[in-house]
Image (cartoon, rainbow, N blue to C red):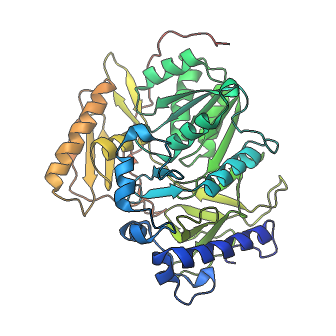
Amino acid sequence: MANLDPTGWGAAQRDARLAALLDAARDGSPLYRRRMGKAQRLQELEPVTKGELMRGFDDWATDRCITLQGASAFLADTDKVADGWLGRYLLWTSSGTSGTPAIFVQDAASLAAYDAIDSLRLRGGAPGTSMWGLGRSFAYVGAVGGHFAGLASVQRLRRLAVPPLAPRLQVFSVGMPLADLAAGLQTMSPQVLVTYPSCAVALASLQAAGELQLGLDEIWLGGEQLSATQRQTVVAAFGCQVRNNYGASECYSMACECAQGRLHLNSDWVILETLDSRGNPVAPGEDAHTVALTNLANRTQPLLRYRLTDRVRYCSVACACGSRFPAIEVEGRADDTLSLPAAQDRRVQLLPLALETVLEEEGGLTQFQLVQRSDHALELRLGQGTANPAAAFARAAAALHAFLQRHGVHKVQIVHGHQHPRSDARSGKLRRIIGWTDNRAPPAKPAAARPRATRGT
């Protein structure tokens, strides 16, 4: 098996699950039946892209009741987030980071696997316990207003909890003005904060400045790349444990962080092949040109050798924690938080996930890049395949202006970029939100939070 020791930890479970997945895909998915042909081994399949799967959506799943028309109609109603679809599935959508949004169908087996992985490996619980704990208070700060993986997962787990023992959980939009978000969190005073690294860093600046006083027990992070500097900033401000994980809409729980702060691949449930430009495996310690994901948990909507845009490297030295799951390093989404001037000589921080959500959900864009040129100018670049670019820019710029005004930013010009979005020269990934190109934007001055509230009981 490429990139994996065939005698390593979890190999027997992995191989049995892979055999069952290949059988299910061949028997039930017309799309994969055509792709597999006479292939008998996973590595004999050509990697597949998100765009290919979405174009062949009606032939993709092993349940022939699953259609693009039906799924799209269900997803159009945002009040149905975490509701069951067709009586047995959970639907969520991916972002358009790679240029193509996608719809993913989660069956009961895949959801059970994600729950078990998070409870036992990421949160360190005992068998049969919930990662949410009994009666604990959680604040989830993420993208709302759509069937996003994080939001759908949180809402689902809240519904599954027995009411008397259910955690106290409140959802906050990552698109809220930072001052309003801080005020809401202070009023709630949660024990656990669940959010993105960029959001945690922005809140940490308020905490360090005394504008926020949260007494957190833990911070759970995901959805973006977490740097060592970001971790240090968050830990220094909040003085609590930070738990990081690596997942995606395609496979919600791919790797969990150990006590040494390193990510370990859940290799009994996930196959990640790190490949060179010719599709050959690269050795541990070497950078890959591309990554192929196989999700062993979901047999309803198979993912076999699915191309991920993240850069993954297998570590060549064993982790000091003693885990027999392989340690990996991930270079994932790493967009910038923008700092812009507002009224009364303040500066506000605009989180990348909030900006992306506005441009996707309200602006109607999937391929774009927003570049900060100065304190008063943003350049919006549209993808090469954008239909009617002038109209698309006008719609997106209007949505972005409205968002900026809600955050107190009124004197910023949005210009239509002449270039198309450009991938980072080093990583090859598309950074969709880019701060000042000279990287010398003035430090953000924290916006004042509302009056503080004491921790509730």
Q: Residue at position x 72%, y 49% from top? A: 116
Query: Residue pushed farthest bottom?
Result: 38
Image quarter of the C terminus: top right
Res 435 seen here: no
User: x, y (%) of residue 408?
Assistant: 31, 23
Percent position of residue 93, x then y: 44, 52
Quadrant in the picture for residue 383: bottom left
Residue at the location (56% across, 43% down)? Answer: 153
- Quarter of the rendering containing residue 136: top right
Location of residue 213 in the rendering, given as x and y in whole percent from the top left corner: 60, 17
- Is 110 placed left or right of 93 in the picture? right
How many numbered marks have been drawn onto this rendered protein structure?
0
Picture quarter containing residue 287? Answer: bottom right
Can you give x and y, in whole percent of width and height, for residue 190 in the image?
Answer: 62, 23
Q: Nearer the viewer, residue 176 or 37?
A: 37
Residue occupying image coordinates x 33% and y 47%: 360
